[in-house]
Amino acid sequence: MRPFAARALLRSNAIAETPIAAVILGSDHLLPRIREVYGDHVSDFVRAAWHNTGPDWRPPFEVVRNSFGLGLVARRAWRAEEAISLLRWDAKSSTPTRWTVECGDGRHAQPLPFEVRYINHSCEPSVHFDLETGVLRALRDIEPGDELRYFYPSTEWSLAEAFECRCGSAECLGSITGAAGMPPQILKRHRLSPWIRQCLGTASPSLRQFR
């Protein structure tokens, strides 16, 4: 699907008429701005796709705008170790992108449901991509309104796009490049995917104790 420009008028108490131009990339019909602008004036197909979040029914999580751009927020509670969502895989590739999870040697795939692609990084994560059981799993108790975040190096040996972390945690590591660039004393604090554990076992003798 090719992107197209969407233009509308936003009416609010603060702003009478503000022109909006946004690029919609297919799955991004979940963007909060689109809901804010168009409300119920969408097709049944689109309404079903972005899950009606009215007072009578809410999805277990929702894509929202935040200081990072977009993020995924819990709409219900989970206890530590509970499965939040089953994982499925789409758009497999041999190289990583900002949307993929590394599943093995040269195996990268975009996770489904596609909302989980909007989970931001944190150096003090609340969820984990449990690739051994095929679920997104809570690492601690999660309450409605909490943002779901995971430790990117727990699945990524080398990120497609390194970045400076702004998670705000007391444990914030600053530069995030992937597990390959992490000190072993940091990695041992986190739950790592089978592939990252395998990489650590062959990358350096000093790291093998953390398999």
Image: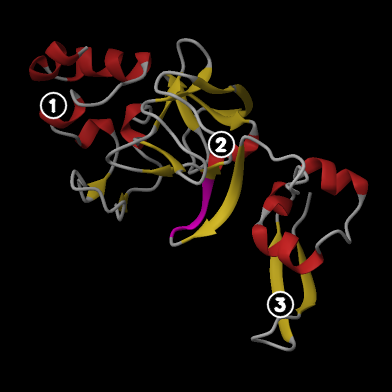
In the rendered view of the protein, which quadrant contains the C terminus?
top left
> Can residue 69 be found in the magenta stretch?
yes
The amino acid beneath tag 2 is Val
Q: Which residue is mark 2?
A: 116
Q: Left or right: where does residue 175 sit relative to residue 139?
A: left
Task: Say which quarter of the image contains residue 79.
Answer: top left
Identify the residue at the far left of this view.
Answer: 206
- Residue at (83% x, 47% y) in the render: 47
Residue under numbered circle 3: 20
Q: Position of residue 14 (x, y in %)?
A: 64, 86
Mark 1 lies on residue: 184
Q: For the residues marked 3 and 2, what is the alpha-carbon distance in whole angstroms? A: 26 Å
Sequence-wise first label, 3 or 1: 3
| Callout in the foreground (2, 1) | 2
Span highlighted in magenta in the image: 68-72
Q: Amino acid at mark 1?
A: Pro
